[in-house]
Amino acid sequence: MLDDIDMKIIELLRENSRLTNVEIAKKIKKSETTVRQRIMKLVDRNIVKKFSIDVNPIIFGYNTIAFVGINTNPSKLFKVVRSLKKIKDINTVATTTGAYMILCQIWTESGIHLGEIVEKIEEIDGVKEVYYSIVQEYHKD
């Protein structure tokens, strides 16, 4: 169970994962030791899974970002997921409910390369349908 202190720590880390334990402690008016122990417990309990950064893909030459919806033969769903995880340019793979069984996010250098990746996805055993939408502009991350 998470209490108010845990929730405050999580919210601060979600806003800025670079905050030090000392900075968090000052903001929530607790000791650095308390914050450090709380964060360790949150990690141990798999509540906080990683401390990460959010990069601008264009800086790294990824000029085309797309969301890809995939429908599969249900019996091969997780085999398809394993295959998708091996494709370098796919940076997110999620199983979902709704219109698609799997949603992926792809970062790539061009529309041509995106087409090549989509073809690779279509060749995976068990894939029935692949739909994609290219991101024009993000309005909220």
Image (cartoon, rainbow, N blue to C red):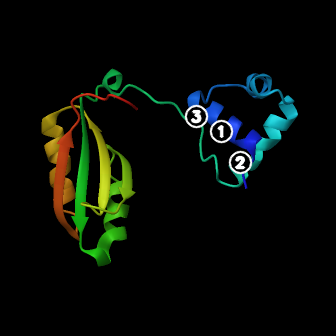
Question: Does 3 sit above or below residue 135?
Answer: below
Asked which secondary structure carries label 3, the reply is helix
Q: Residue at x 51, y 30 (%)?
A: 53
Of the image marks 2 and 3, the number of the one nearer the N terminus: 3
* Residue indicated by mark 1: 10
Task: Tell me the kind of residue under disc 1.
Answer: Ile
Q: Is residue 43 visible?
A: yes
- Quadrant of residue 120 within the rendered picture: bottom left
- Left or right of 126 on screen, residue 32: right
Q: Is residue 39 visible?
A: no
Task: Classify the position of the N terminus by image quarter.
Answer: bottom right
Question: Does 15 sit above or below residue 124?
Answer: above
Task: Tell me the kind of residue under disc 3.
Answer: Arg
Q: CA distance from mark 2 to mark 3?
A: 13 Å
Q: Nearer the viewer, residue 20 or 112?
A: 20
Q: CA distance from mark 1 to mark 3?
A: 6 Å
Image mark for residue 14 = 3
Hey, which residue is sitting farthest front in the picture? 4
- Left or right of 77 on screen, residue 136: left
Of the image marks 1 and 2, the number of the one nearer the N terminus: 1
Q: Nearer the viewer, residue 116 or 50?
A: 50
Q: CA distance from mark 1 to mark 2?
A: 9 Å
**Image marks 1 and 2: residues in contact by CB distance under 8 Å:** yes
Asked which secondary structure carries label 1, the reply is helix
Badge 1: how crowded within 10 Å, few (<14), some, or many (20+)? some
* Residue indicated by mark 2: 42
Task: Tell me the kind of residue under disc 2.
Answer: Leu
**Image marks 1 and 3: residues in contact by CB distance under 8 Å:** yes
Residue 3 coordinates in the image, percent (x, y): 75, 47
Q: Residue at x 37, y 69 (%)?
A: 78
